[in-house]
Image (cartoon, helix red, strand yellow):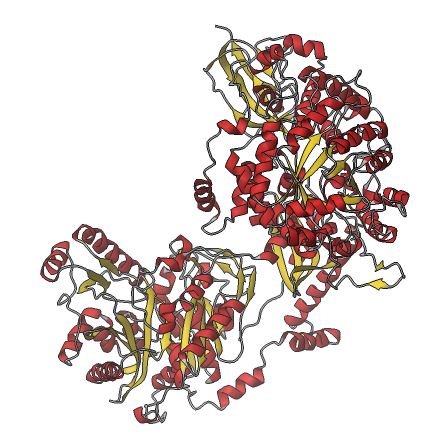
Amino acid sequence: MAGDEFAGDGIASISTSKHHRSEESANMNFDYLKYNFKSLSRAASHEDLTGQSARDAEEVERRFHMPNEEGLEHLKNTSPVVSKKFHKVLIANRGEIAMRIMRTAHELGLKTVAIYAYEDRLSMHRYKADESYQIAPEGKHTPVGAYLAQDDIVEIAVQRNCDAVHPGYGFLSENVDFARKVEAAGLKWVGPRPDTIDSLGDKVKARNVATQCGVPVVPGTDGPIDSMEDAEAFCREHGFPVIIKAAMGGGGRGMRVVRSADELESSFERARSEALTAFGDGTVFIERFLDKPKHIEVQLFGDGKGNVIHLFERDCSVQRRHQKVIEIAPAPTLDVAVRDAILADAVKIARHVNYRNAGTAEFLADSRGHYFIEINPRIQVEHTVTEEVTGLDLISLQLHIAAGWSLPDLHLVQERINIRGFAIQCRVTTEDPAQGFQPDIGKIEVYRSPGGNGVRLDGGSGFTGSIITPHYDSLLVKITCSGATFEKARRRMLASLVEFRISGVKTNMWFLQRLLTNETFIKGDCWTTFIDDTPQLFTATKFRNRAAKLLTYLGDLVVNGCGIQGQVTAPGNDLQEPAIPALVNSQGAAISISAAPPAGWRDVLLKSGPAAFAQAVRQHKGVLVMDTTWRDAHQSLLATRLRTHDMERIAPTTAHALANAFALEMWGGATFDVAMRFLHEDPWDRLDRLRSLVPNIPFQMLLRGANAVGYTSYPDNVVYEFCKQARIHGVDVFRVFDSLNYVENLKLGIDAVRQANGVIEATVCYTGDVSNPARHPKYTLEYYLDLVDELVALDIHILGIKDMAGLLKPRAARLLIGAIRERHPDLPIHVHTHDTAGAGVAAMIACAEAGADIVDLAIDSMSGVTSQPCMGAFVSALEGSEYDTGIPAESIQALNSYWEQARLLYSCFDPGVKASDTSVYTHEMPGGQYTNLLFQAQSLGLGSRWNDVKAAYTEANRICGDLVKVTPSSKVVGDFAQFMVSNHLSGCEVIKQAATLSFPKSVVEFFQGYLGQPVGGFPEELRDAIVRDAPVIKGRPGASMKPFDFAQLRRDLEDKWGPGSIRDVDLLSAALYPAVFDEFQELRQKYGNLSLIPTPLFLSPLDVNQEIQVQLEVGKTLIIRYIALGPLHRDTAKRDVYFELNGEPRIVTVDDTSIQPEVEARVRADPANKNQLGAPMSGAVIDVKVAVGDKVKAGQPVCILSAMKMETVVGAPADGIIESLDIALKDNLGAGDLICTVKSE
């Protein structure tokens, strides 16, 4: 048998990644591989077999198991079949059946000759044979036509001194002309006599033979029909439904069921055309179509000497378009009397024609009886199930009979043939059942087959690296499973399909599993149209293919580097996961975090409910702490880029260390959309996973009132459903706020939380300075007290004070908290601040002393500057006092060791705010926005003008009327400020030119009223100039919105992503962020669940030969090694990346995004030309509102630009007609690039 060849120098062209720092070691790695491949290649070819080369050859033979000639000679010399006249067989077929025949032929000591089409030259059957020959030169035949080239095939058999030809099944196996040519050439035909094929291979003639034998047949035409008139005449006599069948061949080709006269003509023509293509003969006939019959076939053998036996029956009822899908032996539910009658009739027909070799008599059986339909004069695809239950090798029997043996010679008499148990065969094909069984093509990337007791595989093209072409049958491999009972065989088959792993091409394996678990199949009651009659079999199945998706991401990282937005610097080279700290109790004894954590405040909530929980908080002695490390701290310091993985790792430790904490703030706000948008994570999964690890501490989320976790208003039912699902998935405390302190928006959020049975923390957003009313006359102590009174009247549980910019000075804190405590002595008060100015710890101590029950703090290394005040400092300062937090300082220090390392891991997202900044008291920028706005300014080319941005922020706030600034109102002011700096506008110039400026979309929507009503109302004159003709909203925005249609959204999403793929929470994600959710789904389908991989692997590419382990779930770990990066394919701009996955080689192909087609530089707008419109800022075009020739007015929207989550509506520069449009959707523009030219009328 021929052996595999070595690659030789082919590996030398592979290069290593430009992103790696270890190119030299990578090249050394490939030099080593190259040397070894060359050495082995020389040894394999037995060149210069002296000295070391001879030893190399022996090494190859031992390590690569080259064919052992002694073993082959032994098989030949001891074979009872081999003789001078019968020693070499040509197999006139390909793929699975060719290899099946080869295996038995070699066992019998026979030499094998394979043939192949040029397009099939890489097929496995070619090099498994002793010899193989291309049928004809490239281009002479079609890929299928080559295997139908009778004369060429016979010529090869004669020239290569073959003794016999085995046709397999399909192709020429039932072609009487080919059989005659083989025998005329002096070769043995491994099959029935040509005359028998002529009388039985033709279905019309076979019906006549059956009738002569007295075997019942289905009513049908007396012979082949050539015209539509004959077809119509039969249908008029017998009615519908009918079935049109090809007279030659099988496998479902050339068959059409016709149920009405309207379908007859097209079905007739298609059946004839298909038969002609498949078998070279377009002859067809028509039969009456039986409804819901079983398809039963009998395996026959004759020796041509008058001896005929049957090997019992097979149930082949599970089929699609007459192509069998699953076969069973014996038929599990066939009535004994019907079985006996069918077996007797099959033998009767075979004896009548003195049958020789293998054949299959096929019958249909229904409640009225059984009907002969045809005999297939060849071996069948499903012969394996018969072999498994009888213990006989059917190919061996064929070859023995062809060599002249009789059935008695083989000791085969009917009485001695028995069956043992049951066997099931499934045909695994490269077809997609969800797409009408459309064949798939491509390269098999993974092929890991099942095995074990009672499991048999017959394949031909199934192996890693195999190329599946569109030229041939889609059969990949046949699985045959046997067992003592039908149920045992069924379960074994199901387990084998579950074990099977094939990737790179689509297969029908999920569909086979559906069949095997269907109740009708389990009972053995299937009929021939069962698949077509059972649409639930086609319900889409979700394929995880997690390993392949993960490799795709790792490969992309190797080729393109980290593409996560928000990086200030490149990720470090030696990123390490933080070490999990050990915890000790007050006595110094180790605390086991694997044990259940101590009871915490969540236990109180679950036992007593929200109202009693709030009362318990108020009655608690000492100050409670909420840790913001998992949300606001990293939002403020690391652009909200902290991943679930790193929270998950420290979660069990946190559950023990902070068991006395009031809550962990870990969800909502910006973390929701950033998780999907930049981290490629599902925020709902984050909530579920962390909740399971921290069962004792309440989780708090940030709810933007009527805005939920979005940046605009939504229909009311969206907010209600969001709160309901958040509560179900683990949120306990809802900090409900409104970015304008607009009570109507707050009321909606409060009621939504109440209906969800969550803890209502209604929140006042703090700005200004109550200790200096002269400077801040709008936001006085009286204003805040009145607002608190309104909220208390809504029956809230906890009052929140949200000082988002860190403006609450210690003196102001005593005034505000003291006044609230005096007016509402039973109301729990929870205070949140930022430490931007450096006074945070002092302010929180002042709050505690004034009567606050809860304060927000962050673990030391995640605290300070724009984050929350330092937990360690606060806890230590109050330790032993009446305000003692109950949290051990040792626990904080242990957690701090983890987060110190995490800060280093995420340093690429750290904007580098190193110290306090008291200018916050002037610009009033929220802490979370401070770092994000700094990064946005740098991304827009304004980094060097950061002080100008801060000054513009102050001015923009003044222009807007001195707003409460927290997301999304803070975004309005931030976008406004960057717009002013980008366009070199002062506040006075903005007001003066407002009617003609193209303002950011967020600014326009704010003035329209989409966020609600600001304190003191809008500056109406400016509002009119900015809003222009756009609609204005009065009152609460959501009140005028129609309820959101979740049912329609589900239909739309499932149409796009597959039936059953959308969860209730996915509907909310899509309703809140439709574009972000779509992009997240696309990336999830491409890369899988990236939240599972460690952060160093998420941010930084692997080194050559680096091995990593990734846990997909408990007990399932992938071992991955990066091997090398292939060269650039310039025609496709792709690179191959080489890995080992669990020790097996894997290749992923990745787009190299650094290779860009050359494009012409964009035209710049002429600032002096008032009819030309230039881009006001850098950004991507996400919408185009006009076309050339459109009539526009000055300020009318022309397009919308987007940059770093800020959208800007760009208006026409003047009245007129669009003369030229220089942009298209998704174009990336620089500031000043020409958008359009308007021609004045």
Q: Name the quadrant containing residue 97.
A: bottom left
Residue occupying the point 48% across, 80% down: 454
- Front position in the image: 222 or 965: 965
Q: What x and y, as percent, mark residue 701?
A: 67, 42
Q: What x and y, as percent, mark residue 297?
A: 29, 76
> Is any part of residue 606 visible from this angle?
yes
Residue occupying the point 44% across, 55% down: 540
* Image vertical order of residue 982 relative to residue 168, above or below: above
> Is any part of residue 1125 visible from this angle?
no
- Front position in the image: 137 or 148: 148
Q: Name the quadrant containing residue 71.
A: bottom right
Q: What x and y, as percent, mark residue 554?
A: 67, 51
Q: Name the quadrant containing residue 567.
A: top right
Q: What x and y, as percent, mark residue 1147?
A: 62, 56
The number of numbered badges drawn on the structure is: 0
Residue occupying the point 80% across, 15% down: 774
* Image vertical order of residue 299 relative to residue 680, above or below: below
- Front position in the image: 153 or 970: 970
Answer with left or right where residue 850 lies relative to residue 1235. Answer: right
- Front position in the image: 206 or 902: 902
